[in-house]
Amino acid sequence: MGKKSDGKVLAQNKKASHDYFIEDTYEAGMVLTGTEIKSIRNGRVNIGDAFATIRNGEIHIHNMHISPFEQGNRNNPLDPTRTRKLLLHKEQIRKLLGLSKQDGYAIVPLKIYIRNGYAKLLLGLGKGKRQYDKRADAAKKDAQRDIQRALREKQKIAR
């Protein structure tokens, strides 16, 4: 059921892959005002501290910072980190609710992008990593980087 983004990525949560094992992804629409979508298109959005919750059968995102639009009007929201409603199918929300109730799981925003003129948010169902998992991932990345560096140097010498 995981979906990948086709559009231009405007914001990405790199910390999410460091803190969570992402098991499944969902593409959600967002309920925004006109000036908020203009700010998002300009890339003035941050999802580093954002998280999603499910209440009353609806899913909401908290702490997503959308900077106010400079040429905005009186409809510019006063609070850039206000809670925003996300648009998903009921079956997807029920599935996310059941899975996120399990211990150690969270609904994490991964990236924001534009698809067919609409701003979309890629949500991930993540299981929290422990400290030793993070250290193992860092060691694996360092080993890959060393291997790539050695291969590049060997190719330079061979020329």
Image (tube, grey):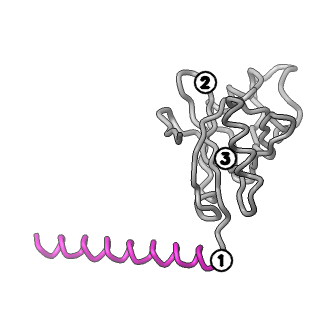
Taking 140 as reference, is 35 left or right?
A: right
Q: Circle 3 — which element?
A: strand
Sequence-wise, the earlier of marks 1 and 3 is: 3
Sequence-wise, the earlier of marks 2 and 3 is: 3
x, y (%) of residue 134?
59, 73
**Magenta-colored segment: predominant secondary structure:** helix
Q: Circle 1 — which element?
A: helix
Taking 85 as reference, is 24 left or right?
A: left
Taking 113 as reference, is 40 left or right?
A: right
x, y (%) of residue 35?
75, 24
Let me know if residue 150 is in the magenta part.
Answer: yes
In-front residue for pair 57/61: 57
**Amino acid type, callout 3:** Pro
Quarter residue 59 falls in? top right
Name the image quarter holding the C terminus: bottom left
Mark nearest the camera among 2 and 1 is: 1
**Amino acid type, callout 1:** Gln
Callout 2: 10 Å neighbours few (<14), some, many (20+)?
few
Let me know if residue 153 is in the magenta part.
Answer: yes
User: Separation of disc 1 and disc 3 at Cα?
Assistant: 21 Å
User: Separation of disc 2 and disc 1 at Cα?
Assistant: 37 Å
Q: How many labels does the image show?
A: 3
Magenta residues span 132-159
Residue at image location 68% in from the left, 26% down from the top = 38
User: Separation of disc 2 and disc 3 at Cα?
Assistant: 17 Å
Dot 2 corresponds to which residue?
118
Q: Are marks 1 and 3 in contact (CB under 8 Å)?
A: no
Residue at image location 72% in from the left, 54% down from the top = 106
Dot 1 corresponds to which residue?
131
Sequence-wise, the earlier of marks 2 and 1 is: 2
Dot 3 corresponds to which residue?
109
